[in-house]
Image: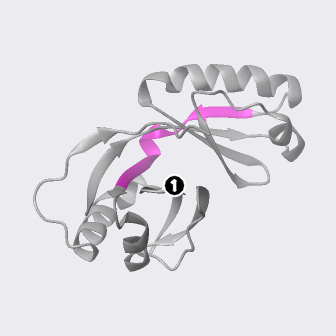
Amino acid sequence: MFEIRRTLVGVVTASAGAGALDGLVVPGRAFGCRTADDELMLLSVPQVTDEVVREVSTRLATLDPDALVIDTTDGWATIMVAGGGARSSFGLLSRLELPDAGFTQGEVVHVPAKVIADDEQVLILAPSMWEAHLLDRVTKALGATGRLETREWRVPTP
């Protein structure tokens, strides 16, 4: 059986030239998602978001002096679908094909979203203005009842 829960995630957006982002060494406390040629989204536990911003800013400044790195955590709503059946139930939310482990982006419950999947869980990030819609659609589509618990996300280990 799977569970649905609100999830606390630190989100950092790094904008720089494609070559600079290609050469960036992502801090071990973060998970990097290349969202565009010139943009990288880094996810972390909320407590280290400021450290990730500082570290990535310093590293990117040597690769691209025009790089911009900011904490965009408040701009995202996040939900985790975890446990047995989490991956297969994602088909009720989106037509996106999940990677075996990693990142994809596209439409989830009719809103633009970022998705990180692994063996037993699927993390869905959508713009924060869609939070109520995301929670409502995901819980209804997957048949969840009761109060949603909020937990902190953990960075996947390679």
Quadrant of the rendering where the N terminus is positioned: bottom left
Residue at 51% across, 55% down: 118
**Where residue 91 sits in the image (x, y, percent)?**
43, 77
Please give the residue where the numbered disc 1 appears in the rendered image. Answer: 118
Residue at 35% across, 67% down: 85
80 relative to 103 in the view: left or right: left
**Where residue 78 sits in the image (x, y, percent)?**
39, 51
Residue at 20% across, 46% down: 149
Q: Does residue 75 show up magenta in the picture?
A: yes
Mark 1 packing: few (<14 Cα in 10 Å), some, or many (20+)? some
Looking at the magenta stretch, what is its main secondary structure?
strand
Instruction: State whether residue 100 is above or below residue 152.
Output: below
Residue at 63% across, 27% down: 28
Instruction: State whether residue 105 is above or below residue 67.
Output: below
Mark 1 is on which residue type? Asp
**Where residue 125 sits in the image (x, y, percent)?**
46, 54
Which region shows up in magenta?
A: 68-80
Q: Nearer the viewer, residue 149 or 84?
A: 84
Q: Does residue 148 show up magenta in the picture?
A: no
Quadrant of the rendering where the C terminus is positioned: top right
Identify the secondary structure beneath mark 1: loop
| Quadrant assignment, res 12 | top right
| Quadrant assignment, res 67 | top right
